[in-house]
Image (cartoon, helix red, strand yellow):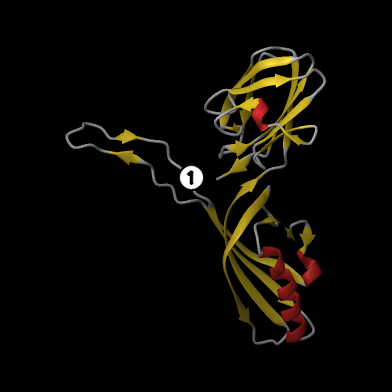
Amino acid sequence: MKVNGIDIRKYDAKQLTVDVQPPDINVNYEWITRALLPEEFDTDVAMGHLKLSIYFRGKDRNKIIRSVSAFMQNFTKSCDMELDGYKGTYKGYMTSSDYEKKSVKNRYVVNLEFDGFFFDDQLNLTFDGKRTATIYNAGTRSAPCIVEVSAKSVLQNYVIKGLSEDPIIIERLEAGKTMVIDGIKGIVMIDGNNAFNNVNMWEFPRMNTGEVTIDFSTDTARVNVKYNPMWI
């Protein structure tokens, strides 16, 4: 097991048990009086839940306490965990922790609970001179995207459809320049400078689940779309 890229054997620890639980899903609907059928609305999917037990050993309890303390420092904010026996990486937000002192003085078990979700390695899709493309996102959650648009010639009101509810419109991008629309960090940049005024959009790009069709208004751009498939 690794936490933020660190093998937990560094702390004389090993993964003991893992319990992955799906999120609570409550379908958003309203059944109006005398209506024959309820009306459904978009349903937000919360994070799932993870219960994790970690086994520690050391030459004495003082050594173990120091190791546990160093280990717990990884969880003061969100963390990325690679769990033994599980595909992908778990993005976790700790919700509780406790420990069990074993009868043998050089053994401890730390129990941790997290809200979170699994995600896969980043995918990089390139559309060079394309007007339309259809892809399949195998993930089960919509995922934020990084969209890099490189202009082969001057782009004026360049429109991208399919990566947000409403079209993303780049009002102007000079030839040879690249605009980065980062849906993860929530920024728009050209040459490292803020370029939010150069784009017209209501929301940052995302990759929906299942089959996704992306349309581009002209074929005079090279577009990279980066995202991590995410899982309920």
Up-down relation of residue 82 to residue 149 (above or below): below
The quadrant of the rendering that contains the N terminus is bottom right
Q: Name the residue at 71% across, 64% down.
A: 74
Q: Name the residue at 43% across, 47% down.
A: 25
Residue that numbered label 1 is attached to: 45
Up-down relation of residue 9 to residue 200 (above or below): below
* Residue 167 seen in this snapshot: yes
The quadrant of the rendering that contains the C terminus is top right
* Whole-percent x, y for residue 142 in the image: 57, 37
* Whole-percent x, y for residue 206 in the image: 60, 33
**21 or 191, which lies in front?**
191
Q: Name the residue at 58% across, 53% down.
A: 116
Quarter of the image for residue 31 reads top left
* Whole-percent x, y for residue 215 in the image: 62, 17
Q: What residue type is labelled 1?
A: Val
Up-down relation of residue 19 to residue 181 (above or below): below
